[in-house]
Image (cartoon, grey):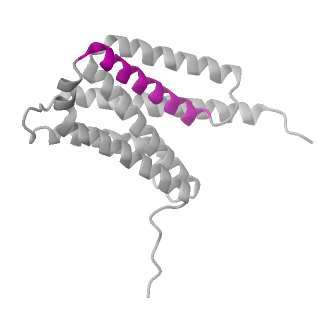
Amino acid sequence: MAKSTPLFTSAYEKRLWLCAMAVLAAIYATLFVGTPLANQLRDQDIQAVFFVSGMLLAAATVIFHGLRTKPGKLELSILIGIIAVYSMLIFRLGAPERSHLIEYSVLAIFIHMALVERAIRKKLILKPGLLALIISFLIGVLDEVLQILIPNRVFDLEDILFNGLAVSMAITSGALLTWIRKKRKSKSPKAD
């Protein structure tokens, strides 16, 4: 009898995939409850609280993904720049695009972290960042394609672009911070 290969390389990878699935379930749940719920929450103050909460949580996800150790001055300056870019982009977008930015940034980070964990254990063919980008982007495309079949929903190529932008920004931001941290560590003097 052949020995079965486990689906996950570690308990941590499994937790990361479960987190990604939870985010994905929330994104797809909005296909059906998004409009009715939005109609119930028309008050701008309530919408603002939900939006700000979502943005803060998404920012925390990006920050913790890229900075798992004490950051140096260069890392902090780049992090501030990333936050500035996200902030300016958010102010330029309408509410639906903002939600795409939040949802797909968080989804991409969890997928990327799970793939990095898998790559550490040498069970990955492509680079984790590229694979996470492809997977997350295709999930965004599927999100839009499903809207063709749902009454009161509209397929929108612009939404696919925003999903792709969110995915790219999140993965690039996290990868940039991780790369800088590794460079900083490789240049630091080793203890005797």
Above or below 3: residue 146: above
Q: Nearer the viewer, residue 86 or 127?
A: 86
Q: Of helix, strand and loop, which mostly describes the magenta segment?
A: helix
Q: Nearer the viewer, residue 181 or 33?
A: 33
Question: Which region of the structure is painted magenta?
Answer: 43-67
Q: Residue at x 32, y 22 (%)?
A: 98
Placement of the C terminus among the 4 image quadrants: top right
In the image, residue 60 lies at what x, y percent? Answer: 52, 29
Above or below 187: residue 130: below
Q: Which of 28 and 86 is in front in this view?
A: 28
> In the rendered image, which quarter is residue 185 located in?
top right
In the image, residue 111 lies at what x, y percent? Answer: 43, 45
- Furthest residue to the left? 151
Q: Is residue 18 magenta?
A: no
In the image, residue 178 lies at what x, y percent? Answer: 60, 34
- Furthest residue to the bottom? 1
Q: Residue at x 46, y 29 (%)?
A: 57
Q: Which residue is drawn at 63% across and 21% down?
A: 76
Q: Which residue is drawn at 46% across and 34% down?
A: 171
- Furthest residue to the right? 192
